[in-house]
Image: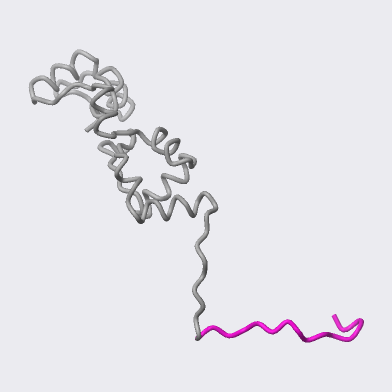
Amino acid sequence: MLSRIQNDEQIAGVLNRAQLRTAYGNYWTRAIVTSLRFNHGIECHDPKRQAAEGWLNLSQAARLAGVTNRTLRLAIDRGDVSAERPIPSGPWVLNKQALQSEVATRCLEKALGKSYPTVPNSSQTLLDLSTTYPKGAL
């Protein structure tokens, strides 16, 4: 999953920051990630394929949506935007399609200040502010 948005050297860095070690207890290197990927038939990172398939990290997705990283993270946490995080302390992996769903679009538009008209509800009571108070009563 990480190879969708990162090259082997970046993946090694993510694994090391997460304090994950190889089967032999070693730190990850680009060569070890490349070997592991090759042995399991995982394609290497290709920026052209990433763009064609619409894979984004959190920052790229937030920039595309026109919101802050935090706003997008909150939307992900609420389940409004679909994203995956293969390693708890690692990067988020999103697809452009996740930003284009109806729920995600509505949520992100709301964050940008675009509002939708409220629908009147007959069970709501009216707040009557027409009463005036004598001078000094308040």
- Establish if 15 lies above or below 110: above
From the image, which quarter does the N terminus lie in?
top left
For the point 8% across and 21% down, the residue is: 39
For the point 17% across and 17% down, the residue is: 34
Residue 82 x/y as whole percent: 30, 48
Q: Nearer the viewer, residue 22 or 3?
A: 3
For the point 29% across and 34% down, the residue is: 55
Question: Please, which residue is most extreme toward the right here?
Answer: 135
Can you tell which quarter of the image residue 97 is in?
top left
For the point 69% across and 84% down, the residue is: 128
Can you tell which quarter of the image residue 99 is in?
top left
From the image, which quarter does the C terminus lie in?
bottom right
Q: Nearer the viewer, residue 125 or 77?
A: 125
Residue 123 x/y as whole percent: 50, 86
User: Within the magenta stretch, is there residue 37?
Assistant: no
Q: Which residues are magenta?
A: 123-138
Residue 12 x/y as whole percent: 27, 21
User: Within the magenta stretch, is there residue 137?
Assistant: yes
Query: Total label count?
Result: 0
Main SS, magenta region, reads loop
- Establish if 137 lies above or below 82: below
